Image (tube, rainbow, N blue to C red):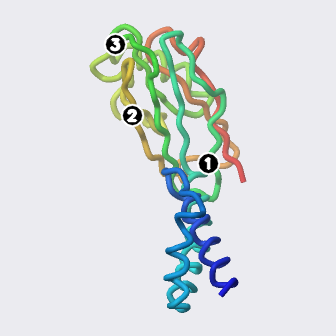
Amino acid sequence: MKAYLALISTAAIALSACSQEPAKPAADTAPAAASATASAPAAEASAAAASEAAPAAAVDEACSTVVSSDDAMKFDTADINISKACKTFTITLKHVGKMPKAAMGHNIVITKTEDVDAVDKEGAAAGVDNDFVKADDPRIVAHTKLIGGGEETSITIDTSKFAAGNKYEFFCSFPGHIAMMRGNVNLVD
């Protein structure tokens, strides 16, 4: 019986690690564990599912990031690290400032390092209605929409768009922001 309780406790801990809700105290899991011991096959199935879910959750977490921006024209990171194991990668941009997008809008544009300056210049000419991104620019790997204070947006990138041996950067294409809002996109193992 002790082995089953330990197995149930381990499964509950593994599942709570995948949850975004705080884990419940161990006292709350004891009645559930006691009733689960009556059905040993069910407990073993739960443990197996938990052990399979843990690596999947780790891959999902490794395949996304959140980048915050503010009214001081800063991203909270200088690097976005994308695991080569990810087939897709999601970037969520949060604008934690208060100013509207027409005055202090931010986006994330990803290009090869060699294309950054030209893409930024042509994006400025595209205007705010086009998120300061030239339409259908083949040099752009991905970009978010332009957002203002209190807003957020996300993009999911097919990682096969990143070629080995190339260097990539992300930046904000709102005119003038690139001087302070620029970083590296790194493909990591």
Q: Secondary structure at mark 2?
A: strand
Q: Tell me where residue 61 appears, x and y as whole percent.
A: 57, 52
User: Residue 150 falls in which quadrant of the image?
Assistant: top left
Q: Tell me where residue 163 appears, x and y as whole percent.
A: 61, 48
Q: Earlier in the sequence, mark 3 or mark 1?
A: 3
Q: Tell me where residue 155 appears, x and y as whole percent.
A: 42, 41
Q: Is residue 111 above or below residue 121?
A: below
- Residue 153's disc number: 2
Residue marked by disc 3: 100
Residue drawn at (51%, 74%) of the image: 31
Mark 1, other Cα within 10 Å: few <14 / some 14–19 / many ≥20: few
What amino acid type should be assigned to the residue bearing mark 1?
Answer: Ala
Q: Secondary structure at mark 3?
A: loop
Task: Indicate which label's residue lies in the foreground, 3 or 1.
Answer: 3
Q: Earlier in the sequence, mark 2 or mark 3?
A: 3
Q: Earlier in the sequence, mark 1 or mark 2?
A: 2
Residue drawn at (44%, 20%) of the image: 106
What is the CA distance from the residue labelled 1 to the residue labelled 2?
25 Å
Q: Is residue 17 above or below residue 80?
A: below
Q: Are marks 1 and 2 in contact (CB under 8 Å)?
A: no
User: Residue 3 falls in which quadrant of the image?
Assistant: bottom right
Q: Secondary structure at mark 1?
A: loop
Between 29 and 69, the one lying in front of the other is 29
Mark 2, other Cα within 10 Å: few <14 / some 14–19 / many ≥20: some
Residue drawn at (49%, 51%) of the image: 21
Q: Is residue 63 above or below residue 95?
A: below
Residue marked by disc 1: 163
Between 85 and 3, the one lying in front of the other is 3
What is the CA distance from the residue labelled 3 to the residue labelled 1?
36 Å
Task: Indicate which label's residue lies in the foreground, 1 or 2.
Answer: 2
Q: How many marks?
A: 3
